Image (cartoon, rainbow, N blue to C red):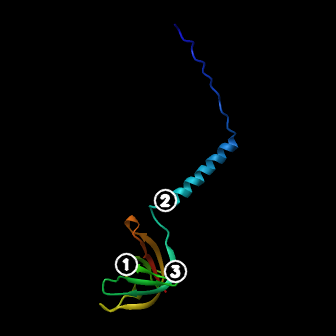
Amino acid sequence: MMLPQAKTTVRRVRLHPALFVLVLVIATLVGAFVAANLPFGSKTLTYSYGTATVTGEEGSGVVTLEKGGSALLPSDIAWVDRDGNTTSGGRPECLKGDGDRQVSGVRVEAGYLWVRLPEGKGSYPIVGWLRCL
């Protein structure tokens, strides 16, 4: 016995060009928003004025922020001196002491970000950029 052949229907969907452009623009905006908020890649620093304290010869220390709290100050960061010269690495002149002498109370502008510890075990701010005032 022979089965009748199934009928196929092709239906064309027409999309108005303006609607197509609108959908494309919305998709682009949503994609840009998602990409900008993903948890990897470069991060924007938060800036605050404060006072820096350097402890020891290695040059690490802490910046007490005017916004409240403090941030870890690594010994090797990007910084701008009082003349506006940018340097990547090392310690600014305004934070250099003699040998092991502690330097404290130096006015700075610090760019910092929050570092999240693995497995959600906390977070802390760390300075990534510094300018001597």
Q: Secondary structure at mark 2?
A: loop
The residue that disc 1 covers is 74
Q: Position of residue 12 (x, y in %)?
A: 65, 30
Q: Secondary structure at mark 3?
A: strand
Q: CA distance from mark 3 to mark 2?
A: 24 Å
Q: Secondary structure at mark 1?
A: loop
The residue that disc 2 covers is 38
Residue occupying image coordinates x 37% and y 66% = 118
Q: Is residue 27 left or right of residue 19?
A: left
Q: CA distance from mark 3 to mark 1?
A: 17 Å
- Identify which residue, 93 or 16, lies in the foreground: 16
Which of marks 1 and 2 precedes in the sequence?
Answer: 2
Q: Position of residue 126 (x, y in %)?
A: 42, 75
Discs 2/1, front: 2
Q: Position of residue 73 (x, y in %)?
A: 40, 80
Three-letter code, disc 2: Leu
Three-letter code, disc 1: Pro
Which of marks 2 and 3 precedes in the sequence?
Answer: 2
Q: Residues within 10 Å of mark 2 (few under 14, many from 20)?
A: few
The residue that disc 3 covers is 48
Q: Position of residue 121 (x, y in %)?
A: 39, 69
Q: Residues within 10 Å of mark 1 (few under 14, many from 20)?
A: some
